[in-house]
Amino acid sequence: MDQNNKLFRSWMFVPGDRQKMIDKAMGAAVDAIMMDIEDGVAPEAKETSRKQIAESLKQLAPRLKADPSLRTPARYVRINAVGHERMHADLDSVITPGLEGLAVPKVDTPEQVKVVEKILDEREPKVGIPSGTVRLLVAIESPRGLYNAFAIASSSPRVMGLMFGTEDFSRELNLPLRREAEAVDLFYARSAIVTAAAAAHVQCVDGVWPNFQDAEGLKKFAAQSRRLGFSGMSLIHPAQIELVNAAFTPTPDELDYCRRVVQAFDDARKRGEGAIAFGGQLLDMPIVDRARQTLDLADYLGVK
């Protein structure tokens, strides 16, 4: 599948100053990694992070070229905020072969996306990356960013998704420190971001579940994320990968039901019927289309 259309269910933050973690993450079962130079790295470790991330990508690039079947998670780098002097140093280092995308934090306006887009347009040809290759996962982390979410999501063909920055957004709203009841206090913001992403036809990644030891809390939160319409979720620890991937993967029961819905509808069409009753509900095209979408997702993920 073309990179522009790849679906990433799980996005793991990886501190850029921890080389062992980067090495381990490259072989993890997570769909995408965000090697971090921003909030997950102390100021005095920023330069170390840049160097280690850049070197890891440079070493990987020839291996990927020699063996196209070599599997790694999608390789993104979370840079420092647009407009911060550190951002330019980040981009000077990490725009290199092997890079697939940038996670751009704290975006409030489409103009901030354009700043990064321009730098990429200029630098990709210079370092041997095909023009337009590096994608952008844009983080919405403030009320202002939320109001501009659709404009941001549709501001550049490089934007492949929106990510909700849960913790920064909660700080701006002065919400309680402890998450409770599956973060119901963030329902509006999360749904608004999902809607903006859907309108722009890009992916939508929910924020992290911060307690990596709370597996039950993570399960409930991730299931809720999927019900709200998110296509994936960010995470902070390898122990969370399996649960997050499972939450965004159709279950055997779902697939069985979807197959029966499609079959019933197709049979009705052959009989010349339109909408039909099935399992206590009326089947019409939107419902059948959703069933087909679920089956297509399962095929893409290799789920039977």
Image (spheres, rainbow, N blue to C red):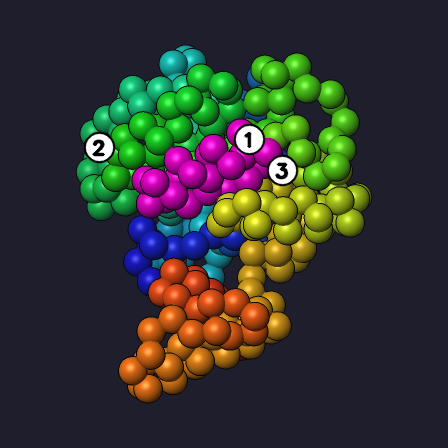
**In front here: 113 or 67?**
113
* Residue position for label 3: 208
Helix, strand or loop status at disc 2 = helix
Q: Residue at x 70, y 39 (%)?
A: 182
Q: Is residue 120 visible?
A: no
Residue 57 x, y percent position in the rendering: 43, 44
Q: Residue at x 54, y 34 (%)?
A: 190
Q: Earlier in the sequence, mark 2 or mark 1?
A: 2
Q: CA distance from mark 3 to mark 1?
A: 17 Å
Tell me which amino acid carries mark 1: Tyr
* Residue position for label 1: 188
> Residue 46 magenta-drawn?
no
Q: Earlier in the sequence, mark 3 or mark 1?
A: 1
Q: Name the mark nearer the viewer: 3 or 1.
A: 1
Residue 19 x, y percent position in the rendering: 59, 40
Q: Residue at x 30, y 58 (%)?
A: 2
